[in-house]
């Protein structure tokens, strides 16, 4: 009996040591790390129709390449048609997809009135939608107290209402087919409070809440909901980020030496999360990954740590300058 107890204690200790090592050395939460080694591969998505919004640059663009390589049929959306054409060409070079397998659909996420005809166009072309990836979005750098209410409003329109509008039009089609998958590109700012990004943090938390509520409702209809939370990743996001003033762009460039995740690595892990229909994933290097775990399991300790570290130290980590 004592031997069994010792064995159990050792197993628990071993389990915790392995978990801590995976968190310290990994660039994604433990479940996603395991799925990337032993779960379904991105190639298992071959043939599926995946609609990616915000596919003209950054994470959305790289996800398009990852999925094209896997043999998915794609709908590429964003406002800049020329950039979408460039991404389509590159998808055809990198993947075994034909011209008719990739539909370019110019779309403004906040032109809600145009969303219905966009969905109709996709259905007319592909007859169905397997996965909708709500990726289009913009970030922010601004002091909370100085941020104009109009900026909060604009952020909610793009990063929340745009996502809700398109999803609400695609979901009935998925429900009718009894099959579908909604994927939201949230952020670790959808889990933690990111200083100097108040409106962005609020918007990403809202998306998480909205879709966490949906998950069980549509589960019975065989529709899956995945919230993806990346940490700092190389992209165009800082160039066009919101500031404290409405209509202004940050126009900041990322330095290639910064400690951000490479865009293709982020896209690969997103592909794994989609292929394995995971509920929520965190894709980020340390120390941000450690913060995510601390915030989830020891919320008061994490918030105390954040206040002790202060604004400058947290900003350095966010901007990959630590
Ligand atoms: N990079 C990061 O560190 C990071 C971290 C966590 C989460 N994220 C999230 O990842 C997603 C993609 O961002 P990214 O980093 O790849 O930035 P990005 O390179 O700036 O890409 C943003 C994409 O969103 C599109 N977009 C912006 N406003 C739009 C609008 N009104 N209508 C339609 N499309 C619009 C852009 O296309 P057009 O300009 O052509 O319309 C672009 O394709 C965002 O939701 C962001 O919040 C990024």
Image (cartoon, grey):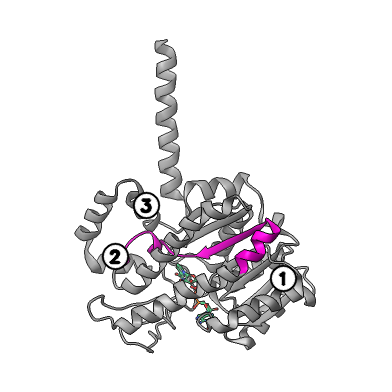
Q: Name the residue under label 1.
A: 94
Q: Position of residue 290 (x, y in %)?
A: 37, 52
Above or below 54: residue 212 = above
Q: Mark 2 points at which residue?
A: 314
Q: Is residue 318 left or right of residue 85?
A: left
Q: In which quarter of the image is the C terminus?
A: bottom left
Stretch in magenta: 170-194
Q: Can residue 92 be seen in this view?
A: no
Mark 1 falls on what kind of element? Answer: helix
Residue designated by label 3: 290
Q: Is residue 192 magenta?
A: yes
33 lies left or right of 242: right
Q: How far apart are marks 2 and 1 (CA)?
A: 38 Å
Apparent side of residue 90 relative to residue 230 in the rendered image (left or right) = right
- Outermost residue on the left side: it is 308
Q: Residue at x 53, y 81 (%)?
A: 112
């Amino acid at each position: 009996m004592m031997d069994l107890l010792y064995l159990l204690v050792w197993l628990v200790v071993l389990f915790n040591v392995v978990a801590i090592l995976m968190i310290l050395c990994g660039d994604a939460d433990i479940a996603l790390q395991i799925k990337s080694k032993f779960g379904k591969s991105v190639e298992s998505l071959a043939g599926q129709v995946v609609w990616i919004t915000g596919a003209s640059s950054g994470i959305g663009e790289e996800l398009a390449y990852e999925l094209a390589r896997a043999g998915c049929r794609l709908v590429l959306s964003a406002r800049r048609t020329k950039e979408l054409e460039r991404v389509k060409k590159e998808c055809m070079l990198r993947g075994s997809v034909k011209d008719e397998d990739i539909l370019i659909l110019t779309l403004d996420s906040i032109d809600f009135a145009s969303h219905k005809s966009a969905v109709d166009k996709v259905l007319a072309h592909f007859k169905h939608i397997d996965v909708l990836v709500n990726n289009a979005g913009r970030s922010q750098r601004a002091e909370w107290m100085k941020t104009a209410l109009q900026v909060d409003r604009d952020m909610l329109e793009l990063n929340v209402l745009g996502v809700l509008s398109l999803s609400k039009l695609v979901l009935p089609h998925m429900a009718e087919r009894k099959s579908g998958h909604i994927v939201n590109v949230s952020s670790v700012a959808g889990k933690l409070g990111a200083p100097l990004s108040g409106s962005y943090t609020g918007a990403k938390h809202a998306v998480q809440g909205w879709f966490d509520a949906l998950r069980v409702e549509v589960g019975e209809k065989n529709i899956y909901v995945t919230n993806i939370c990346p940490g700092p990743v190389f992209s165009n996001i800082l160039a066009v980020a919101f500031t404290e003033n409405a209509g202004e762009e940050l126009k900041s460039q990322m330095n290639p030496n910064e400690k951000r995740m490479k865009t293709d690595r982020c896209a690969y892990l997103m592909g794994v999360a989609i292929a394995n229909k995971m509920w929520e994933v965190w894709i980020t290097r340390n120390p941000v990954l450690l913060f995510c775990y601390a915030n989830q399991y020891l919320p008061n300790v994490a918030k105390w740590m954040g206040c002790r570290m202060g604004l400058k130290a947290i900003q350095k980590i966010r901007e990959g300058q630590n």
